[in-house]
Image (cartoon, rainbow, N blue to C red):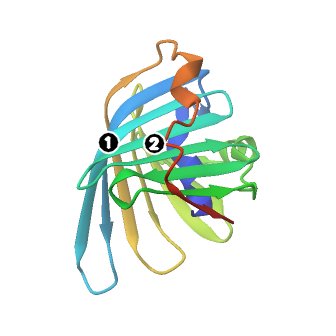
């Protein structure tokens, strides 16, 4: 679980980027490795306060719940859940305060010495960065909403008989 996962939740207003109370959107995630091979993922992201739920639906289903205390990742096809009680140590408020506008609807922030780009035009449209192993990561958000999200959406749910990996 990379430190950048929490960055995918940023919304901007005017000249400063801020976090909304609720945010959900369809996401399309493209990862291009240093050799040029591309992986494509699709799903839906839900964000409320300090909780995040990524529901990957393509090419395989995967569910990731993130809280300030850690994360849970459930992979139904593998009948496996990974449970981490290690906080991501990602201060989004600090990152947002440091983000600078570098063009029309384009912002940049620095996280652990890496540049992260946000495209924002009335709503969050895209995040682009290079991860710690050199992969280029592009996440586009489609059909965004700031409507209230039920608290139950952020409650991890998986069968009791799955294999559990604790980190």
Point 37% across, 31% down: residue: 25
Outermost residue toward the bottom?
35
Residue 65 left/right relative to 67:
left
Q: Could you say where residue 22 lies in the image, as x and y percent from the top left?
A: 55, 21
Residues 4 and 108: in front is: 4
Question: On the rendered image, what quadrant is the N terminus found in?
Answer: bottom right
Point 32% across, 56% down: residue: 77
Callout 2 crowding tier (Cα within 10 Å): few <14, some 14–19, many ≥20: many
Q: How many marks?
A: 2
Label 1 sits on a secondary structure element that is strand
Residue 40 left/right relative to 89:
left
Question: On the rendered image, what quadrant is the C terminus found in?
Answer: bottom right
Whether residue 86 is visible here, answered yes or no, is yes
Residues 101 and 21: in front is: 21
Q: Could you say where residue 151 lies in the image, as x and y percent from the top left?
A: 59, 19
Q: Height in image: 77 above or below 154?
A: below
Indicate the quadrant where residue 65 lies: top right
Point 32% across, 42% down: residue: 43
Residue 54: mark: 2
Outermost residue toward the front?
161
């Amino acid at each position: 679980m990379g430190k950048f996962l929490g960055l995918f939740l940023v919304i901007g207003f005017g000249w400063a980027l801020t976090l909304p109370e609720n945010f959900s959107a369809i996401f399309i995630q493209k990862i291009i490795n240093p050799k040029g091979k591309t992986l494509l993922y699709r799903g839906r992201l839900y964000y409320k306060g300090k909780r995040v739920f990524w529901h990957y639906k393509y090419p395989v289903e995967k569910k990731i719940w993130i809280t300030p205390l850690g994360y849970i990742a459930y992979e139904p096809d593998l009948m496996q859940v990974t449970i981490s009680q290690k906080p991501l140590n990602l201060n989004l408020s600090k990152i947002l305060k440091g983000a600078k506008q570098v063009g029309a609807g384009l912002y940049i922030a620095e996280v652990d010495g890496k540049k992260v780009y946000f495209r924002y035009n009335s709503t969050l449209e895209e995040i682009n960065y290079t991860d710690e192993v050199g992969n280029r990561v592009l996440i586009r958000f489609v059909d965004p909403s700031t409507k209230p999200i039920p608290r139950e959406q952020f409650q991890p749910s998986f069968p009791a008989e799955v294999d559990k990996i604790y980190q």
